[in-house]
Amino acid sequence: MIFILLILVLFLLLPVICFPSCKRDEGYVDALIVLGCPAYDDGTMSVTQKMRVEKAAKAVIQYKIPVCIFTGGKAHNHYSEASIMAEYFTKLTHQKALLEDKSTTTYENMKYTQKLCQEHQFKKIGILTSGYHVNRAYAMSHKFFDDVIMFHAPYRFTIKKILREYISRYQYLYIEIRNYLKRKEK
């Protein structure tokens, strides 16, 4: 019985152990990438989008960040996450933003934005996302960027968001283990 309980505890703690906390290390970067999240089904900004954009606007002004890149395609409905967030950002700051609007996952956010950063020769990258999502995003970022600083946007705590993040961490771990095993076979 104790063995089963131990396995269960390990299973529940695995996503926490494998994604250690990153420092809240905000400061100047060449470009700030704001990770996408879905708008409401009618195309209006979600609360999470609004919080991320408002945090981005404050960071751009406070740290004099020259470029903000919004990511996210039409992952959950017919509205581009990046376009909706960039429009609000421009209203707040009167500054244009770059868009990456093909991605549908956090991994794709990083992958497609990496190309934009290389084209514009951005070296020091800031990634802004909600606090519950920041550790997994930080883990993924090192596959694509050498010099990364994480920016934490506030968020409204909901069980649904935390559960979705927990499940996403397991999916990411599964993919990483599978890729590792494929590389070992070669």
Image: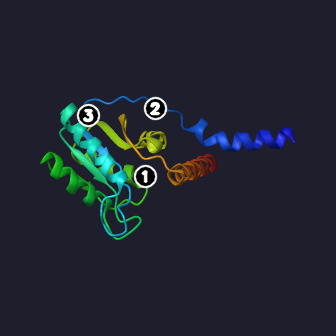
For the N terminus, the image quarter is top right
Q: Residue at x 63, y 48 (%)?
A: 181
Q: Secondary structure at mark 3?
A: loop
Classify residue 67 as left or right of residue 36: left
**Mark on residue 29?**
3
Residue 140 visible to an observer of this rendering: no
Amino acid bearing label 2? Cys
**10 Å neighbourhood of mark 1: few (<14), some, or many (≥20)?**
some
**Residue 173 position within the rendered picture, expressed as x and y whole percent measured from the top left:** 58, 47
Amino acid bearing label 1? Thr
In depth, the one of 115 and 105 nearer the eye is: 105
CA–CA distance in space, label 3 to label 1: 20 Å
Amino acid bearing label 3? Val
Protein image colouring: rainbow
Q: Secondary structure at mark 1?
A: helix
Mark 3 against mark 2, which lies toward the viewer?
A: 2
Chain-order first, disc 3 or disc 2: 2
Classify residue 159 as left or right of residue 156: right
Q: Residue furthest left?
A: 94
**Residue 87 position within the rendered picture, expressed as x and y whole percent measured from the top left:** 20, 57
Q: Residue at x 12, y 48 (%)?
A: 94
**Mark on residue 127?**
none
